Amino acid sequence: MKKELQLSLSVILLFACGFLYKFILKSSCLFCLPSFKSQQGLEALLSHRRGIVFLETSERMEPTHLVSCAVESAAKIYPERPVVFFMKGLTDSTPMPSNSAYPAFSFLSAIDNVFLFPLDMKRLFEDTPLFSWYNQINTSIERHWLHISSDASRLAIIWKYGGIYMDTDVISIRPIPEENFLAAQASRFSSNGVFGFLPQHPFLWQCMENFVEHYNSDIWGNQGPDLMTRMLRVWCKLEDFQELSDLRCLNISFLHPQRFYPISYSEWRRYYEVWDREPSFNDSYALHLWNYMNQEGRDVIRGSNTLVENLYRKHCPGTYRDLIQGSEGSVTGELGPGNKES
């Protein structure tokens, strides 16, 4: 009897410790503790488990419903991994927003494995090739600063901590089985909207070096997908994809366009159409919705039976339930300026 009581108490203590650990991690990024506490919590969170990373490089505090769907779907597909959303507008002294004023922020912060952290670029770029560049750049005259800073931040975060980076218009539908990978947008051309690496991978270090050496903010994508593509060509002899097979070079997988881009950027409107027979996406891990192309303001409308509505219902049901309205009061899905969705 005594042994059974001891065993029961041990199990209770174990659960209590797990709850306390999760509470401390949540508290470090949501209840405005001193900055060293937030940084300590971030490193503890990402050092031991491969996280899923999202970025918002504008000052925006309330995510759009598409951002909410992207984060929620990742949390749903990777329940045992931390999903970390870095927000430039969030600081260590930011008061907790109210549910009514910031429903998407409140919804995401309540998900067990979602963690919201301030994006401190100066601290992030320390000990990387990007630090001197960042200290010299005049951000006020940069044409595409929100996108360029996002390109730089994602490289530094994944290099430091490892994990998977995703744009905030990428809806996860099944786990990505690769550790070190790039996502092909087309044959012989890489995107930087989804990629994953183990910590301190030399490919990402060389990407950061090339970012600085060939910096040209006037060329759209020069620091983003063009950078990934030219560095991949240094590492690998790129060939055309054969059927649905991925390509492998050294310890990097170059994943077929079907994995994330089964609908190409030129066809992005098809997400907002009603299909006679919807695709299964059986060969895809996630879907990039090309929100940067959506300058027309096409939206997700409850009851429309469009492909994107059905994706929301299946892969981010909480977002669909709480943030999507009917045609008479549709919630806008405009692009947040800090979300580089190319």
Image (cartoon, rainbow, N blue to C red):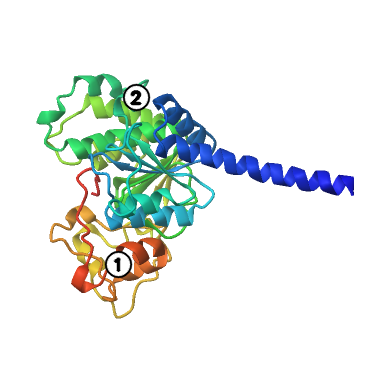
On screen, residue 64 above or below 279: above
Marks 1 and 2, the one that precedes in the sequence: 2
The percent coordinates of residue 289 (x first, y second) are: 27, 58
Which residue is at 76% across, 44% downward?
Answer: 9
The percent coordinates of residue 339 (x first, y second) are: 25, 46
On screen, residue 213 above or below 317: above
Viewer can see residue 59: yes
Query: Disc 2 marks which amino acid?
Result: Arg
Image quarter of residue 180: top left
The percent coordinates of residue 55 (x first, y second) are: 32, 42
Q: Nearer the viewer, residue 175 or 48?
A: 48
Which residue is at 41% across, 39% downward?
Answer: 30
Q: CA distance from mark 1 to mark 2?
A: 37 Å
Q: Residue furthest bottom?
A: 276
Q: Residue furthest right?
A: 1
Q: Nearer the viewer, residue 4 or 196?
A: 4
On screen, residue 313 above or below 217: below
Image quarter of residue 38: top left
Left of 226 or right of it: where is 124? Answer: right
Q: Residues within 10 Å of mark 1 (few under 14, many from 20)?
A: many
Left of 68 or right of it: where is 218? Answer: left
Residue at mark 2: 123
Viewer can see residue 240: no
Asked whether the beta carbons under mark 1 and mark 2 sit within 8 Å of each other, the answer is: no
Query: Disc 1 marks which amino acid?
Result: Val
Q: Nearer the viewer, mark 1 or mark 2?
A: 2
The percent coordinates of residue 103 (x first, y second) are: 32, 54
Q: Secondary structure at mark 2?
A: helix
Q: Nearer the viewer, residue 201 or 320?
A: 320
Residue at mark 1: 308
